[in-house]
């Protein structure tokens, strides 16, 4: 009887550490899965904010453009210049920054979720317990590309940071008030706009490509980030130098011509008629 009790006591002593270890592992797994669910909720919330940002930005830019086009041909009005040269680019840059912040937030959370999936899969000794985020960042054998899409993000970034500010400046200078501005003033404002435009592309472009690296998990993107930033820096310095020389030349021409204005279509027609 004593031998039976002694064997039972030894068995309980061996089982107790195993039960404690199992409890620790279960607690660790619970904490990890809770963090996983929290980050998934954060990603979903951030995606909703991105959609709201796109809707608000599109409506705001459309409303400003309609207001500017109402007086687009009126040479006496300064409203088109204010809208197309200042307000539209400003709203577009701000909206692009807000969207980019949420996109980077989503990409960063997704990259961390992929690491959690790796930990959980390693714990279970198999690779199919949690797979979604890691699957998005794993190149396919057939194509060598990751399933995570990038074309939609490139489209949104290009629209708010490149297309809208660039086309808005062209529209503003082609308006009636824009063609009536002195040449020297046009050159000066054009230099400022170009510096802001290139600076925004260089700064936000680096942030965007870096976020794209988190979203896709592609090491080649990191090299592309460095190349884009280096090229943007050299391009900004080059264009700033060229535009500075153009501004000086434009001011000299304007002073030599007594502050002449850029001829409008109506003035050109009157000249040819006389």
Image: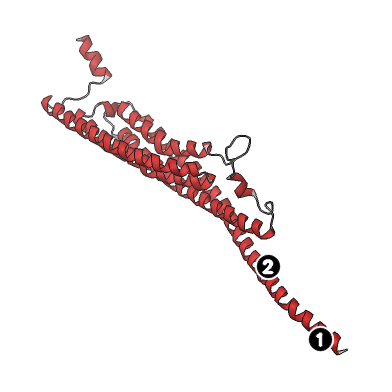
- Residue 80: x percent and y percent? 33, 33
Quadrant of the snapshot with the N terminus: bottom right
Question: Viewer-proximal residue, 164 or 78?
Answer: 164
Which residue in the structure is indicated by mark 2? Answer: 26
**Which residue sits at x=55%, y=55%?**
112
Locate residue 228 relative to residue 181 in the image: left or right: right
Q: What colour scheme has been applied to the protein in the rendered image?
A: secondary structure
Q: Residues within 10 Å of mark 2 (few under 14, many from 20)?
A: few
Separation (CA) of disc 1 from disc 2: 30 Å
**Which residue sits at x=62%, y=46%?**
135
Q: Residue furthest bottom?
A: 2
User: Disc 2 on helix, strand or loop?
Assistant: helix
Q: Is residue 95 visible?
A: no
Which residue in the structure is indicated by mark 1? Answer: 6
Quadrant of the snapshot with the C terminus: top left
Question: Viewer-proximal residue, 32 or 68?
Answer: 32
Mark 1 / mark 2, whichever is N-terminal: 1
Question: Quadrant location of residue 21?
Answer: bottom right
């Amino acid at each position: 009887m004593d031998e039976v009790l002694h064997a039972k006591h030894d068995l309980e002593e061996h089982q107790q550490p195993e039960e404690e270890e199992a409890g620790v592992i279960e607690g660790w797994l619970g904490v990890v899965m809770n963090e996983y669910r929290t980050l998934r909720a954060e990603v979903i919330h951030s995606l909703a904010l991105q959609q709201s940002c796109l809707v608000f930005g599109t409506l705001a830019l459309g409303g400003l453009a309609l207001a500017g086009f109402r007086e687009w041909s009126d040479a006496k009005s300064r409203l088109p210049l204010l809208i197309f040269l200042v307000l539209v680019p400003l709203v577009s840059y701000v909206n692009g920054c807000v969207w980019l912040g949420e996109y980077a937030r989503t990409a960063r959370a997704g990259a961390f979720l992929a690491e959690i999936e790796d930990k959980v899969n390693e714990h279970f000794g198999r690779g199919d317990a949690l797979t979604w985020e890691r699957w998005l960042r794993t190149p396919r054998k057939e194509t060598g590309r990751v399933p995570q899409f990038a074309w939609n993000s490139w489209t949104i970034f290009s629209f708010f940071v490149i297309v809208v500010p660039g086309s808005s400046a062209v529209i503003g200078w082609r308006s009636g008030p824009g063609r009536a501005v002195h040449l020297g003033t046009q050159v000066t404002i054009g230099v400022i706009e170009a510096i802001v435009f290139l600076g925004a592309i260089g700064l936000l472009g680096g942030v965007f490509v870096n976020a794209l690296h988190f979203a896709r998990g592609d090491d080649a993107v990191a090299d592309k980030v460095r190349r884009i930033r280096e090229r943007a820096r050299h391009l900004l310095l080059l264009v700033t130098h060229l535009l500075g020389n153009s501004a000086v030349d434009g001011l000299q021409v304007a002073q030599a011509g007594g502050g002449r204005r850029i001829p409008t279509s109506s003035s050109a027609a009157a000249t040819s008629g006389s």
